[in-house]
Amino acid sequence: MSRRLLITGGAGFIGANFAHFWTHAKPDDRIVLLDALTYAGNYANVAALCDPGAVRFVKGDIRDFDLVCNLLRSEKLDTIVHFAAESHVDRSIVGPGEFVGTNIVGTQVLLDAARAVWLKEGVEHRFHHISTDEVYGSLAPDAAPFSESHPYDPRSPYAASKAASDHLVRAYGHTYGIQYSISNCSNNYGPYQFPEKLIPLCIVNILEGQPLPVYGDGKNIRDWLHVHDHCSAVMKIIEHSPPGETWNVGGNSERSNIDLVRALCAAVDEAFARDRSLATRFPNCPAARGASSAKLITFVKDRPGHDRRYAIDSQRMSNQLGWRAQIGLAQGLADTIAWYLDNETWWRNVMSGKYRDWITQQYGS
């Protein structure tokens, strides 16, 4: 079945990866990317797709009802894949209002546009909403991973805004008949990730010889999912899930933050040992002098309300849709480090100016 997709947040980390993934798998489908190009959105992430004209890029806000309606009608779109979101917990603690505006109001406007076009005009459709494991709250060390039936218990403004948007999607499905699906994923990593999140921040800081900030005792645990595995899961859901279903998508790769950072340090050190030219390119990296990058690890004051553990049970995805994560954490980290080494210009550009000032303010120079 061919589709005509609107991908919101299409120039962001996961949205851009999904655009590349879908275009490669289904080159005859029509894709329209909608992105406001705020600090984390980068047209360079999708320029190679858009320049030939196979994919259309539109700069705009998901809260612009008329714009979304016009795109749905003019492009005859039948699928919305809703990635657009403010997603950095630290930023939500400092400024919750942006998260309410984008994540809650933005989702509501998209749903209203879907009602106005799809339901009024009788379009067969799918609204797929991307959510997070953080809506479920925090797990005890010995607790079973989150299943789809786990009660919601969001602990941060970010998590609360995503929980609210999940509830809106379900409510519009029940009340109005929007044909929806939802996926709640664990922590993503991989190419094009904006370097405010733990893995790309640590990679870049290791290469620059900057401190690696680790909150508290570093024993907070997360489940890590490579973004390419996430993209394959979303495609599987859109193509094979009945409407009205929620799916948990995880990488089955739980690690404490400190163990993850140490693994990144070791992997970068190994890369420098294999390729001596890296020492010339990145002379400030400890590995350039034969030292361990782990010396950069710096424990910082824990953030407010820091959840102790997240873990996702993806068994339902495996049993009913035949999906499971394919990229192990060791290989995924090695591939991600290789991508950042190969794309130095990209991350230097996105980390210039005000963003670097923000990182310094948050974590120290």
Image: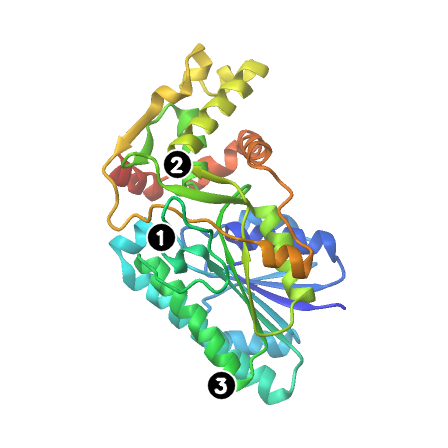
Q: Which mark is residue 215?
A: none
Gap between marks 1 and 2, in whole Å? 15 Å
Q: Relative to the observer, which residue lies in front, 113 or 172? A: 172
In the image, 258: left or right of 268?
A: left
User: Label 2, on which residue?
Assistant: 257
| Residue furthest to the top | 290
Q: Secondary structure at mark 1?
A: loop
Q: In the drawing, does residue 4 fall left or right of residue 302?
A: right
Amino acid carrying mark 2 in the image:
Asn
- What quarter of the picture does the N terminus occupy? bottom right
**Residue 64 seen by the camera:** no
- Kind of residue at disc 3: Thr
Coordinates of residue 94 in the picture (x, y in percent): 25, 53
- Residue occupying image coordinates x 38% and y 32%: 258
Closer to the camera, 345 or 102?
Answer: 102
Q: Is residue 147 left or right of residue 24?
A: left
Residue positioned most to the front: 142
Residue drawn at the location 59% of the way across and 54% of the way down: 315
Rate crowding at label 3 as few (under 14), some (14 to 19) or many (20 or more) other CA atoms within 10 Å.
few
For the C terminus, the quadrant is top left
Check disc 3 and report the residue beneath it. Answer: 175
Amino acid type, mark 1: Ser
User: Where does residue 134 sit, x and y in percent of width and height?
Assistant: 40, 55
Pick whichever of labels 2 and 3 is earlier in the sequence: 3
Q: Is residue 177 above or below residue 351?
A: below
Q: From the viewer's perspective, is the residue at label 1 or at label 2 nearer?
A: 1
**Mark 1, residue position:** 138
Q: Secondary structure at mark 3?
A: helix
Dot 1, crowdedness within 10 Å: few (<14), some or many (≥20)?
Answer: many
Tag 3 or tag 1, which sits nearer the N-term? 1
